[in-house]
Image (tube, rainbow, N blue to C red):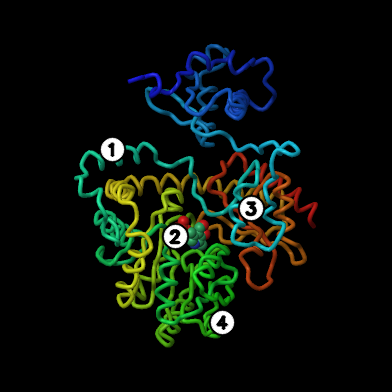
């Protein structure tokens, strides 16, 4: 076998002060560590340090540059915090991600410019268009700090699973999901969300998105044609429900969550709610609203679809138990690891009221015969070992720092913006005085280099303009730059 093909390139001999063209005499004011970190970032960005390349050992680079070793250590720490490099034990510090850079526009006649996601009313492909739009800072809501994904723990768990898996595990599985994950998820829900669930009743799904399709099919079979949605509420969720044939009448949200009398007025047989951290306002469903909602469900037989999308992430407030814990007979609960680990895993769980459990299992069977088994077993192991809880604690610390940095940058640069819903989750919402076109603002922000959602995307009826800003994936050190871009966009749009 050709070993050379399997071994990552060893750049350690090349990557030094010369290779990086570092000369301390040229360092601008602002600190040597900052300058070293910037120089390395540039080298990663322009391809001189490709993915997998090793940075020179700190001691050697410090000696070559004639600076203190701590200066280089601090630079590497910043790069690691930004997610560009990671310590790999004896392998040293390795490049793991390139900085986001705006690609050059295509030369005339060589390709199409990416579609402007803000040019028209948001349609089904709008999130793809936004993802493709180049930006220096991405404040798109909905992702945790993906640079912190526990790669080593995942690999360890995957190795252990493969070492022990019997061949029959590689056959068709139970459509409800692998038993170890159902057990681990039920324990997780008990510990973190106050839900008592029998693992036999839990169904592993490909994220909340799939659960929405499954519940829509269950409802359609019962001739329920409308699922009321929060307004504002997630555009993506509304699109999914509409795709599966559901009407989505809006029920307004205020600082205490959904207005239950308005929900009554919709006449819908089901309601999609985000009680723990309303998307996108961040409101927590108040206790008397919870009671009113229980009254609605019991009086009408209505089903609450509880989208518990980011409830594990909270900073300045105690946990809010899931609605499912109070009302198991009327709540179809769904959660996922998209905000705990990574959306790319496409793994989550759903719990139906007992009367719908069989229909849920059937819907999942006919959707895909069950989710991929190996990733389920790996996730189960991460949950059993405590690695997932450790990861959540790490994320909380990182996210909190990023959130605080964004809030203080906004206070300085956009003093008229009102911040909402920052006590929990992965995003916050800012609103502006009426009269502003927030889609034009988001469009201008994108031209300045910052990507975000206009609040109006998530509204059905007109309301205060604003932006939804995801902070979890952007290092604290870049928040001032992000706020400056938003401020320039606001100056142009206002
Ligand atoms: C409110 C809300 N619900 C559901 C989802 C989809 O989550 P999943 O990745 O679990 O399908 C998202 C994704 O961002 C979301 O913001």
The residue sitting at 32% across, 20% down in the picture is 1
Q: Which residue is mark 3?
A: 452
The answer for how far apart the CA atoms under marks 3 and 4 are is 29 Å
- What element does badge 4 sit on? helix
Q: Which residue is mark 4?
A: 262
Q: Which residue is mark 2?
A: 311
In the picture provided, is 176 more to the left or to the right than 448?
Answer: left
The residue sitting at 63% across, 71% down in the picture is 460
In the picture provided, is 431 more to the left or to the right than 259?
Answer: right
In the picture provided, is 402 more to the left or to the right than 175?
Answer: right
Which residue occupies the foreground of this view, 464 or 168?
168
Q: Which residue is mark 1?
A: 159
Select label 1 or label 3 by which is in front: 1
**In the figure, 141 relative to 147: above or below?**
below
Select label 1 or label 4 by which is in front: 1
Density class for disc 1 (Cα within 10 Å; few <14, some 14-19, many ≥20) is: few
The answer for how far apart the CA atoms under marks 4 and 2 are is 25 Å
């Amino acid at each position: 076998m050709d070993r050379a093909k399997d071994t990552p390139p060893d750049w350690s001999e090349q990557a030094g002060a010369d290779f990086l063209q570092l000369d301390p005499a040229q360092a601008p004011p602002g600190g040597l560590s900052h300058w070293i970190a910037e120089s390395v970032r540039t080298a990663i960005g322009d391809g001189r340090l490709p993915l997998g390349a090793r940075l020179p050992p700190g001691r050697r680079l410090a000696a070559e540059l004639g600076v203190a070793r701590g200066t280089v250590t601090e630079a590497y720490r910043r790069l690691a915090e930004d997610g560009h490099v990671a310590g790999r034990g004896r392998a040293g510090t390795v490049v793991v991600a390139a900085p986001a850079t705006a690609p050059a526009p295509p030369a005339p006649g060589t390709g199409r410019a990416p579609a402007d996601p803000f040019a028209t009313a948001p349609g089904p492909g709008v999130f793809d268009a936004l993802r493709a739009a180049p930006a220096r800072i991405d404040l798109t809501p909905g992702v945790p700090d993906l640079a912190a994904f526990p790669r080593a723990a995942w690999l360890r768990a995957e190795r252990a699973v493969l070492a022990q898996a019997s061949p029959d595990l590689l056959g068709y599985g139970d459509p409800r999901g692998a038993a170890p994950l159902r057990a681990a998820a039920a324990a997780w829900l008990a510990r973190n969300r106050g839900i008592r669930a029998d693992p036999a009743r839990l169904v592993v799904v490909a994220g909340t998105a799939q659960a929405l399709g499954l519940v829509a099919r269950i409802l359609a079979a019962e001739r329920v044609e409308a699922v009321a949605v929060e307004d504002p509420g997630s555009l993506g969720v509304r699109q999914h429900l509409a795709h599966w044939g559901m009407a989505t009448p809006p029920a307004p949200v205020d600082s205490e969550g959904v207005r239950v009398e308005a929900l009554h007025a919709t006449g819908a047989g089901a309601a999609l709610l985000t009680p723990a951290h309303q998307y996108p306002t961040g409101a927590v469903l108040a206790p008397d609203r919870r009671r009113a909602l229980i009254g609605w469900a019991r009086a009408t037989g209505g089903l609450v679809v509880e989208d518990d999308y980011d409830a594990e992430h909270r900073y300045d407030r105690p946990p809010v138990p899931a609605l499912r814990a109070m009302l198991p007979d009327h709540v179809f609960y769904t959660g996922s690891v998209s905000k705990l680990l990574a959306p790319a895993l496409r793994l989550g769980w759903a719990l139906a009221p007992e009367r719908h459990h069989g229909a849920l299992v059937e819907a999942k069977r006919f959707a895909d015969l069950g989710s991929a088994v190996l990733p389920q077993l790996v996730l189960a192991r991460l949950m059993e070992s405590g690695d997932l809880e450790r990861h959540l604690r790490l994320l909380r610390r990182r996210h909190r720092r990023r959130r605080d940095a964004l809030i203080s940058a906004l206070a300085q640069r956009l003093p008229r913006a009102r911040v909402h819903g920052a006590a929990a989750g992965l995003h916050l919402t800012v609103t502006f005085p009426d009269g502003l076109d927030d889609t034009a603002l988001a469009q201008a922000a994108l031209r300045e280099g910052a990507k975000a959602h206009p609040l109006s995307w998530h509204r059905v009826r007109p309301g205060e303009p604003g932006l939804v800003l995801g902070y979890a994936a952007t290092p604290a050190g870049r928040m001032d730059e992000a706020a400056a871009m938003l401020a320039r966009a606001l100056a142009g749009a206002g």
